[in-house]
Amino acid sequence: MDTQKLSASEKTQLTHELLNQAYKRLTLGSRRSPMHELISTMLSHRTNHADETTAYNTMLERFGDWEGVMLADECELAQAIKTTRYPEQKAPQIQQTLRMIKAARGEINIDFLADLSIEEAMDWLTRLPGVGLKTATLLLLFNFKKPVLPVDTHVFRVSQRVGLIGAKVTAAKAHAILLDMLPPDALELFNFHKHLFWHGQRVCTFYSPKCDECVLNGLCNYYQDVRQKGIDRAA
Ligand code: SF4
């Protein structure tokens, strides 16, 4: 098969198949409650997983529950989450988010999102401060099993290098473009997301992608370009 002649949609499906073989398939069972996922994802911005977890645990140990976090002194909350990047920005965003949820629902709980359509749930979530497309899609896929596709930095980089999306496509637009080329099935989207995420972390890294050992190198635009340039230089 001449993989360079494949359409973006065919490449996306082939990428999904190859990564399904390269990485273990996962089942879709949420690891944490929706509120936990929401606030953890806000804390995780530009922060590694260990530091995000430390901040989350410290915050709840210090203030007890979401009500306590919401009513805490803002500086003390920033201090509790200081292992994350930008704690002074995240503290007021978290408190404002908790206040908005309480005002809208009478309690600090977002389980009701399960009953909304994807559009309604996305609209509701992205009105919260500090909640963008990535956080909203993560929450809707991981916790509510809705067929959306979170596009983080790894998913975006690998998709662009392979050629599933164009070089000028923004991360915000990549979400809809990729979603359109994949089956509208939460489990498939979850595995596609996780596999691209792992691939970006372990193989297609930002500075030195390990192209020679990559299962996608036969269809990857970036690899073909680099290899072509290497051949040209050698000639
Ligand atoms: S061939 Fe290289 S650039 Fe392409 S996906 Fe694999 S590691 Fe990334």
Image (cartoon, rainbow, N blue to C red):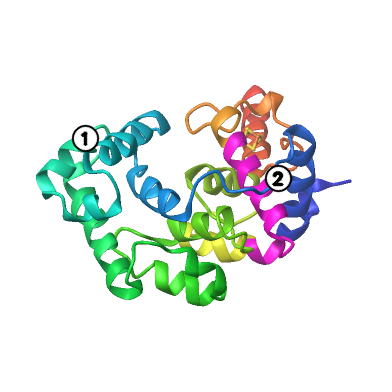
In which quadrant of the rendered image does the C terminus lie?
A: top right
Amino acid at dot 1: Lys
Residue 138 location (% of width, % of height): 51, 54
Q: Earlier in the sequence, mark 2 or mark 1?
A: 2
In the image, 220: left or right of 118?
Answer: right
Residue range corresponding to the magenta coloring: 179-199
Magenta residues: mostly which secondary structure? helix
Q: Residue at x 48, y 51 (%)?
A: 33
The count of marks equals: 2
The answer to whether residue 163 of the structure is visible from this angle is no
Q: Residues within 10 Å of mark 2 (few under 14, many from 20)?
A: few
Q: Which residue is mark 2?
A: 27
- Nearer the observer, 219 or 48: 48
Task: Look at the numbered discs 2 and 1 and tell me whether their residues touch, using CB distance below 8 Å.
Answer: no
Q: Residues within 10 Å of mark 1 (few under 14, many from 20)?
A: many
Q: Is residue 10 above or below residue 14?
A: below
Residue 19 location (% of width, % of height): 73, 39
Q: Residue at x 75, y 52 (%)?
A: 11
Q: Residue at x 75, y 33 (%)?
A: 22
Labelled disc at residue 82: 1
Q: Is residue 154 magenta?
A: no
Residue 211 location (% of width, % of height): 65, 28
User: In the picture, residue 71 is in which quadrant?
Assistant: bottom left
In the image, 200: left or right of 79?
Answer: right
User: In the picture, residue 224 is in which quadrant?
Assistant: top right
Residue 111 location (% of width, % of height): 48, 64
Labelled disc at residue 2: none
Amino acid at dot 2: Thr
| Distance CA(mark 2)–CA(mark 1) | 33 Å
